[in-house]
Every structure is written in C-alpha cells, then in structure tokens.
Amino acid sequence: MNFIVISIRKYFFTFMFLAFTICLILFSNNNLIAAQNGLVLWATSVVPTLFPFFVATELLCQTNFTYIMGKLLNKFMKPIFNVPGEASVAILLGTISGYPVGAKVVCNLKKQKIISKIEAERLIAFTNNSGPLFILGTVGIALFKNKHIGFILLISHILASLTVGYCFRFWKKNKLEVNFRETKFNSKLTPLKISDIGETLGSSIGKAVSSILSIGGFVVLFSVILSILENSGILNIITSIFTQIGIVENISTSIITGFIELTNGVNLSAMLYQNLPLLSILITSFLLGFGGISVLLQVYSIICKENISIKPYLYGKLLQGIFASVFTFILI
C-alpha cells in the first residue's frame, strides 16, 4: 500500500495531464465549441474591461506614485491593515484594475523590498479583486441587464475586501522577521521625461498585452476543462450529490462552474435571475469574491516566483466570498 501511495504521488500530474490529453481527443467536437465560446467571452467581455486598466496600472508603476501614496496613507495603513503606507498602491490598483493586477503589484513591492514576506502574504489575501468595469459592465449591464445590481455587487465586493484586509492584519503578527530592507525606499523620485514617454508607453502596453493574453489562455483552457467535466459525466455526478442535499441542479451547476472558472460561473448564475433573483445575485456576489480556481492558479503562477505562500490568498478569498454575500444581502 505504501508503494502504491508513493507511486500515485510521484506520477499524479503525469496521469492527470495524460487523461486531459485523451479527453481532448475523445470530446474534440464539444471542446472546440467550448474553446470558441471561451474565446468570444474573453474577447467581448474581458479585454474591453480590463486591458485599459492594465495599461494604466503599468504606467503608474513607472512613476513615483508608490512613494506619494506611502507618504499620504502611512498613518492609516499601519493601524488598519498592519502594512506600510506604500502598500496602499496594491489595494488601490488591485481594486480598480481586476484580477490578477493586485498579485503583480504585491510581488513588485516585495521585489523592491518595500514590504516583507509576511506583509506580502497579508496583502495577497485581499488586494486581488474583480475590477469595477468587469462587475459594472460585464456582470451588471451585460449579464444581469441592470446597472443597479452591478453597483450593489461592486460596493459589497469592496467592503468584503477591506473587511478581509482588517482580519488579516493579525496574520503572523507575533512572528519576528529579519530586516528585509537592504536600503531605505525612496521610490526613485526622478520624474519621467517627455523623451521617455514613448518607451514607457510601449513597455506598459507590452506588459498589459502579456497579462491579458494570459487571462485569455486561462479562460479558454478552463472553458475546455468544464466541457470535459460535463461530457464525461463528472459534473453530473457532482451536481447529483448537491441535489441529494436539496440544492436545485441549475444552482449547483452555477456554483461548481464558478468555483472552477469565474466568468463562466457568473454567466450561469446570472441566468437564474428571472426565476430566483435574490439567490442569483447572492451566488454571483460570492463567486466574484472568491474568484475561482482559474484565478487562483493565475495568482499562484505570479507569487510563487517571490516565494509568497498561496494559503492566505485561498483563506482570504473564501472569506471575501462569504462577506460579499452577506453585504449584498444587507444592501438588497
């Protein structure tokens, strides 16, 4: 038995990726349609809402914006979130830009030795959020056909994020860290010159394109994974388990789908609005707060390079989903 367990651990990903490849062949027709739908969803909803913010975020990171925010907000950030004032940049950009900008900004702050590893873990728990354009435009107007629902979801999302941030101020609070700052941070106060604008803009667009393509890859890939789960019967088995405990099939399908991939899950939950309006909005609010496994893997691919633990992110997003649903219910 020990030998079997060791073998499974050793070759788990090999067998999993092999099974995925076989399923791509077995369900090729349905997978093609799923990939096309994922690509259309990304191109028509994700790119228009996120790409401009990605460019704007990259441009701000090339300026002394971090230093200015640190000076202005240091006296608020430390007592509320137990992080330095410069970390407010991660909160601001992570809130207005959408996934996974918050994670990228946190990693940049740690790389520049502005924050420590523990402070990065506190920040990663609540600074990676759905952007306002995605919530208001894609979810509120495009899916629910109601801008008021979009505003309720956005306010709940921000309140939940800040609540999680306050909770995580106690994360490893009593654990001492060695001095991580080699030199005092001064944010390179040299302002941008007009001659540098072209190069800075080109670099920012290039990084934004890379980020948006990465998100598109995850959306398409997880659309195909959802198609495989549906056509292989695995999704039906999971749904039937939820049905046994009294959860309607359409509801359980939207929740499971949203746990795997946010955009497709929110799309399904919005379809419940006509028959179950309150429940539809609450499920959507939870999914927006949690973000899904697809976003989790995007974040992990970024933070693992800086040796930042994924655990606070996972705990934080689960809490944020719960808090967001509670705040949404109260607002409604």
Image (cartoon, grey):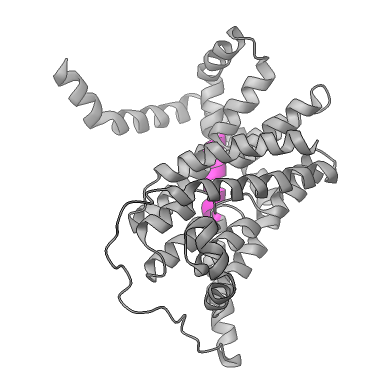
Q: Is residue 215 magenta?
A: yes
The image shows residue 156 at horizontal and vertical percentages of: 70, 44
Give the magenta range: 213-223
The image shows residue 65 at horizontal and vertical percentages of: 57, 76
- In depth, the one of 266 and 166 nearer the eye is 166
Q: Is residue 20 above or below residue 130?
A: above
Quarter of the image with the N terminus is: top left
The image shows residue 309 at horizontal and vertical percentages of: 36, 48
Side of 212 relative to 283 (left or right): left
Which residue in the rendered view is the most extreme toward the top?
A: 244
Q: Quadrant of residue 241?
A: top right
Q: Is residue 263 magenta?
A: no
Q: At 59% from the left edge and 46% from the top edge, which residue is drawn?
A: 163
Q: Is residue 216 visible?
A: yes
Q: At 62% from the left edge and 38% from the top edge, which residue is drawn?
A: 323
Q: At 67% from the left edge and 34% from the top edge, which residue is drawn?
A: 325
Magenta stretch: dominant secondary structure? helix
Side of 124 relative to 89 (left or right): left
- In depth, the one of 254 and 229 nearer the eye is 254
Q: Is residue 272 visible?
A: no
- In depth, the one of 306 and 39 nearer the eye is 306
